[in-house]
Amino acid sequence: MKHVEIQKMYWTMLILLCIMFALVAFVLMQGEGIPEDSVGIFSFVILTCVLVAMFFYQLKTEVTEKAINLSFGIGLIKKTIDLGTVTSVTVVRNKWYYGWGIRLIKNGWMWNIKGMDAVELTFKDKSRVFRIGSQEAPRLQSKIESQLNK
């Protein structure tokens, strides 16, 4: 049985939209269009906002019988974790300064999109851990453990 959790990052989308609208409003208030020397910067900021929105608007976590599949946004940034390599799953609370996104943390990696709760995976052949942010960390832990115990 497959378990899927999709977390959306609405507040980030709102911030990106506000940045884009503020830039457009600034240009419109100038009355003369975009100054020629600012076109590159204006385009870069708008393009960056659009790309961040596309690549990081959600985190999808899918637990299958053999793997944990993770993907950000439209799915170009993804990772598959073979359950055969996982030795334990623990619910943890991330430190506030770990932030969100894909992060290198003190003892491994973290993929998180919102909140501070996560499940931490330890592996048979590695000393590093991998944390997956979750709004339902105990439920995700249970689903992963049920697949490990098969």
Image (spheres, helix red, strand yellow):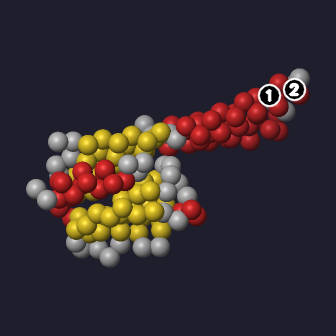
The correct choice, above or below, for 51 with respect to 135 in the image is above
Label 2, secondary structure: give it.
helix
Question: Could you tell me the amino acid type at mark 2?
Answer: Met
Closer to the camera in the image, 139 or 94: 139
Q: Is residue 96 above or below residue 1?
A: below
For image coordinates 21% across by 42% down, the residue present is: 2
Disc number at residue 29? 2
In depth, the one of 50 and 94 nearer the eye is 94
**Residues tagged 2 and 1 counted as in contact (Cβ below 8 A):** yes
Q: Is residue 130 left or right of residue 81?
A: right
The x and y percentages for residue 104 are 47, 65
- Seen in the image, is 96 located left or right of residue 60? right
Looking at the image, residue 105 sits to the left or right of residue 89; the answer is right
Q: Position of residue 126 (x, y in %)?
A: 29, 74
Q: Quadrant of the N terminus?
A: top left
Depth check, front residue: 16 or 137: 137
Q: Residues within 10 Å of mark 2 (few under 14, many from 20)?
A: few
Q: Whole-percent x and y of residue 65?
A: 16, 49
Quarter occupied by residue 27: top right
Residue located beneath label 1 in the image: 25
Residue 146 to residue 9: above or below: below
Vertical arrangement, residue 67 with respect to residue 15, above or below? below
Name the foreground residue: 119 vs 113.
119
Looking at the rendered structure, the secondary structure element under dot 1 is: helix
Q: Quadrant of the C terminus?
A: bottom left
Name the residue: 32% across, 64% down. Answer: 90
